[in-house]
Amino acid sequence: MAEKITIGVVGAGTMGRGIVQLFAQAGHAVRCFDAQAGAAEAAVQHVVGMLQRNVEKGRLAADAFNRIRSNISVAPDLPALAGCGVVIEAIVEDLGVKRELFRSLEAILSEEAVLATNTSSLTVSEIAAGCARPGRVAGLHFFNPVPLMKVAEVIAAVRTEPATVRLLQTLTEGAGHRAVVTADQPGFLVNHAGRGLYTEGLRVVEEQVATPADVDDVLREGMGFRMGPFELLDLTGLDVSSRVMASIYEQFQQEPRFRPSALVPPRVAAGLFGRKSGEGWYRYDAGQQQRPAARPVPALPAGLRVWVDPQAEHAEGLKALATGGGLVLVPQDADADLCIVQPWGMDATTTALQLGLDPARTVAMDPLTPFGLRRTLMLTSVTAVAVRDAAHGLLASDGVAVTVINDSGGFIAQRVMATIVNIAANIAQRGIASVADLEDAVKLGLGYPHGPLAWGDLIGPARILAILRAQQDATGDPRYRPSPWLVRRVALGQALVVPEAVR
């Protein structure tokens, strides 16, 4: 159990208020300061109001409310923070301002006191470099809303002492949050691990493989993400997300895996920021997302002759759909009106040519998404319209939604998942965080149904590697180069969640 200490919070905005509430609820005395007159008082009243609502809803007992309320006070000035064992700043994202604040705090606090920054974009080492005691400085990055997002990143700067990291871990865990330790690298852990969803989703749309709504539908309904990348970009704001994407790309020395999309700047320039501006990737009327109309499901032609690749992941399910719809299954592709394949990593055109199929009569269905969820139908570059419509009608004949896309190695889900897993593997390879911290950070901070490495193990590390290599071979883009972590574990038959031998 964490020892009860006095915690100072500088900055009374949304994040500062959440941090005050979190640690006051954990039993610590919390002093809130803001340089703007009246801001700290307003923050305390906001926190008290939130707690009172919890009492009214029966989530918090009255005596517990009184104890928590007694833990919170306003600091009229910085010297009033003297005696705090930890001070957490949540002020403007400006390096000079943060450095000046920490220099002022060092003159007030004891030499044993810890200074923590809630920065989300600045390098903690840069902030600490302006301090006389950089070993007592670390990052403590929370997510909004702080009391509900049960994870915080403890960022160890280059000169941060291990005791500083342990103290912040203990405080955070004692407040009921998972404390994940990360190196002082761009995006830290959660934002770093989350790059793949955005960058590859945008790449799919750039290549005219699918629309933003198609990408969102497949990943949300087919793979279990809470929101697709374009829904998330609209929620966070394209103006904000654009700066973050550009910043991480530049801070990582223009690493191709994080290359921003050229689709975003024109939308930002046009003021299409997302929900807050009424339009982004989607339009919003009275705050409600307006989704494009679904593609009509064509009628299933009678007597259609269908050939299903016997190596297909869902061969039996596809055959059952065909016979259930009154269609004719044929053993030879040459006798078929419609040929269905299920490649991993390859596009429909290449797969058809490798198997000796007629590309005009061939379509592909993604084997990654569960058969009973949303299905992705991929066409070759020359798939006949009648074949496209027949395949759509067949795949939708049992009521499952179908997304129709253009040709692309890896469909939508395979490409995005391989990118996510590969970035996570590189995080582990570089020792930015432990496997356990990486997995928990992604589940709690991003809301993914699985940690990225465990998800890669569920899909199959060899399949992830095959998807990446196929993309790299087809495009020549180094963004798809596989992490050594992934390559070695596939070669050894090991799970991706297995840590290094020396750690």
Image (cartoon, grey):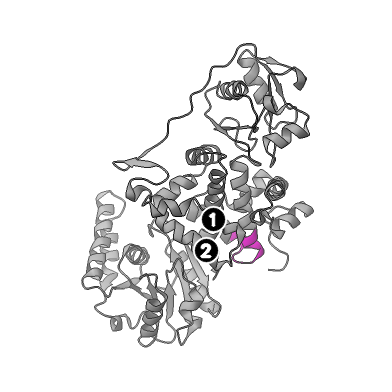
Q: Name the residue under label 1.
A: 195
Q: Badge 2 local density, few (<14 within 10 Å), some, or many (20+)?
A: many
Of the pair 36 and 478, the residue shown nearer to us: 478
Distance from label 2 to label 1 (Cα)? Answer: 9 Å
Q: Which residue is rendered at x = 54% and y = 50% of the image?
A: 197
Q: Where is residue 169 in the image (x, y as percent from the top left)?
A: 49, 69
Front position in the image: 193 or 2: 193
Residue, disc 2? 248
Query: In the rendered image, which quarter contains the C terminus?
Result: bottom right
Q: Answer yes or no: is residue 1 visible.
A: no
Q: Do callouts 2 and 1 mark residues in contact (Cβ within 8 Å)?
A: yes
Relative to residue 342, is residue 436 drawn left or right? Answer: left
Residue pictured at 49% horizontal, 53% vertical: 446
First in residue order: circle 2 vs circle 1 = 1
Horizontal relation, residue 80 to residue 464: left or right: left
User: Is residue 362 toward the left or the right of residue 420 in the image?
Assistant: right
Q: Residues within 10 Å of mark 1 (few under 14, many from 20)?
A: many
Asked if 37 appears above or below 474 in the picture, the reply is below
Q: Where does the magenta region start and end?
A: 426-436
Please tell me in which quadrant of the rendered image residue 86 appears: bottom left
Asked if one can make out residue 441 in the rendered structure from this viewpoint, the answer is: yes
At label 2, the amino acid type is: Ile
* Residue 43 x/y as whole percent: 26, 65
Q: Which of 82 and 337 is in front in this view?
A: 337
Q: Is mark 1 on a helix, strand or loop?
A: helix
